[in-house]
Image: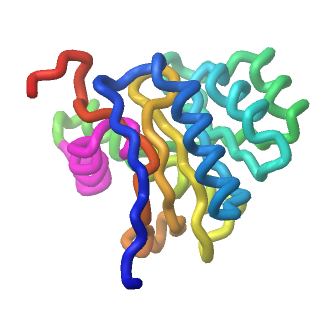
């Protein structure tokens, strides 16, 4: 056979209400397919802490916003969540966003957009969580915390929590176009809370 049939879960709307389902579905997939590397986006660390419990024993990389994302010099990751993540054997990566970085400063100052942020906006056509999954995978690969020669499970979301899980063959930022989104485990049907069709 030249194909595989897979079950994909589509949530009615994006958001944190999908977090537990995404983590369960992603773990089931990882266990079935023998994937050990899990990349999880987390802002305050709440989703990361929960993922570090669910995926205990896996190579879990929790990727946070860089310090100063909201307020200059200030991290958003709560210390109690960082502690829990590390106690559960997961890693925490805080780094510049792969799909914005310095370009965000250019946009803010000069009111223009450059190619990296265009890529981010194009990925958002598939949902914020899809863009986040790809971005944190690149960041974790650049930090050397996941392999680039085999699939990982990436988990991201819209605003807070998790609503998207993808199977991704990672790539470093300098080889971004070698990255492959291999499978969708779960994602929202809509990019907004209101479903129109």
Is residue 127 a member of the stretch shown in magenta?
yes
Name the quadrant containing residue 77. top right
Q: Could you tell me how many numbered marks the image carries?
A: 0
Task: Say which of 194 and 132 sits in front.
Answer: 194
Q: Is residue 23 above or below residue 170?
A: above
Task: Say which of 162 and 80 sits in front.
Answer: 162
Query: Residue shown at 48%/44% (left/top)?
Result: 165
Pinpoint residue 13: horizontal percent, then vertical percent: 30, 23
Task: Say which of 156 and 182 sits in front.
Answer: 182
Name the quadrant containing residue 45. top right
Which SS does the magenta portion mostly show? helix
Residue range (magenta): 113-131
Pinpoint residue 17: horizontal percent, then vertical percent: 46, 17
Scheme by which the image is coloured: rainbow
Query: Residue shown at 10%/23% (left/top)?
Result: 196
Q: Is residue 193 above or below residue 62?
A: above
Q: Is residue 146 above or below residue 195?
A: below
Query: Residue shown at 42%/22% (left/top)?
Result: 159
Q: With 74 as the anchor, is 61 left or right in this view?
A: right
Pinpoint residue 176: horizontal percent, then vertical percent: 42, 67
Is residue 175 a member of the stretch shown in magenta?
no
Query: Residue shown at 19%/16% (left/top)?
Result: 194
Of the 4 image quadrants, the one containing the N terminus is bottom left
Pinpoint residue 22: horizontal percent, then vertical percent: 53, 34
From where the camera sits, is residue 142 visible?
no
Q: With 68 as the anchor, is 50 left or right in this view?
A: right
Of the 4 image quadrants, the one containing the C terminus is top left
From where the camera sits, is residue 19 visible?
yes
The residue lying furthest to the bottom in this view is 1
Name the quadrant containing residue 178. bottom left
């Amino acid at each position: 056979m030249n194909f595989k049939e897979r079950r994909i879960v589509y949530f009615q709307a994006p958001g944190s209400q999908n977090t537990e389902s995404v983590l369960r579905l992603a773990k089931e997939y990882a266990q079935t397919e023998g994937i050990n590397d899990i990349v999880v986006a987390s802002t305050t660390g709440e989703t990361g802490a929960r993922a570090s419990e669910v995926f205990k024993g896996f190579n879990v990389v929790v990727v946070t916003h860089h310090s100063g994302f909201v307020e200059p010099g200030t991290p958003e990751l709560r210390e109690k969540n960082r502690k829990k993540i590390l106690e559960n054997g997961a890693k925490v990566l805080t780094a510049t966003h792969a799909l914005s970085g310095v370009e965000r400063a250019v946009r803010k100052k000069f009111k223009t957009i450059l190619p990296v942020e265009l890529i981010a906006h194009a990925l958002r056509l598939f949902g914020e969580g899809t863009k986040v999954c790809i971005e944190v995978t690149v960041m974790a690969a650049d930090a050397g915390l996941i392999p680039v020669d085999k699939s990982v499970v990436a988990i991201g979301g819209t605003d807070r929590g998790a609503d998207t899980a993808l199977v991704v063959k990672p790539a470093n930022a300098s080889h971004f176009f070698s990255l492959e989104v291999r499978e969708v485990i779960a994602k929202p049907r809509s990019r907004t809370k209101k479903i129109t069709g």
